[in-house]
Image (cartoon, rainbow, N blue to C red):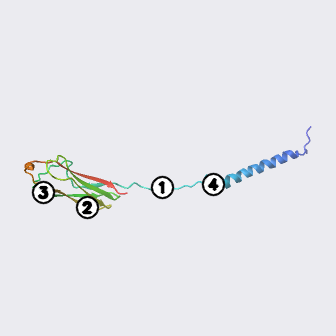
Amino acid sequence: MIKPNMKTPAIFRVGLALLCLMLFSFALMGNLYARYTVSDASSDGATVATFSFSDDLSEQSLTMDLSLAPGESEETPIKVVNNGEVALKCVVKLDNLTNNLPVEDKEVTVDIPMGEEKTVTLELEWPSMKNDVSFMGKTDIIRISVRVEQID
């Protein structure tokens, strides 16, 4: 028969105390030195800005009858409207594709703030010094392109 009032051995009590101290020290080490376990919560309410513009060029490809002579010029106004929520940089470029006439390529750059409109005037000119008879009766193909970029 087992004695009900039997004392637990001293080694068992020492082991139990060491186990408790070890668990307590692990808890302290985890909370004091492990700062990477800190967590935080937040919310983001960012939206994407609208990139939108319009111009008054009626067609993608347009044929215009212009009659220029040496020393004359013709102006073409192009209205660009910034309908978006960001500032824009507008580059209007004139390219002489066939080089039959001495019309030079040009490029005009303008910044357009949000919600505003600008009129870019592109000048097509024939220099007066280039007045050779070989240019008489010739036609040329001129391309006007509008490139719009967002300003950071």
Residue, disc 4: 35
Mark 4 → mark 1, Cα distance in angstroms: 25 Å
Residue, disc 2: 118
Mark 2 → mark 4, Cα distance in angstroms: 56 Å
Q: Is residue 64 left or right of residue 48?
A: left
Mark closer to the chain start, 1 or 2: 1
Q: Nearer the viewer, mark 3 or mark 1?
A: 3
- Residue 43 % position (x, y): 50, 55
Residue, disc 1: 44
User: Which of the two residues, 131 or 4, is positioned nearer the viewer here?
Assistant: 131
How many numbered markers are drawn?
A: 4
Residue, disc 3: 129
Mark closer to the chain start, 4 or 1: 4
Q: Is residue 68 left or right of residue 115?
A: left
Mark closer to the chain start, 2 or 3: 2
How crowded pointer 1 is (Cα within 10 Å; few <14, some 14-19, many 20+) is rated as: few
| Three-letter amino acid code of the residue under disc 3 | Met
Identify the residue at image location x=14%, y=58%: 73
| Three-letter amino acid code of the residue under disc 4 | Arg
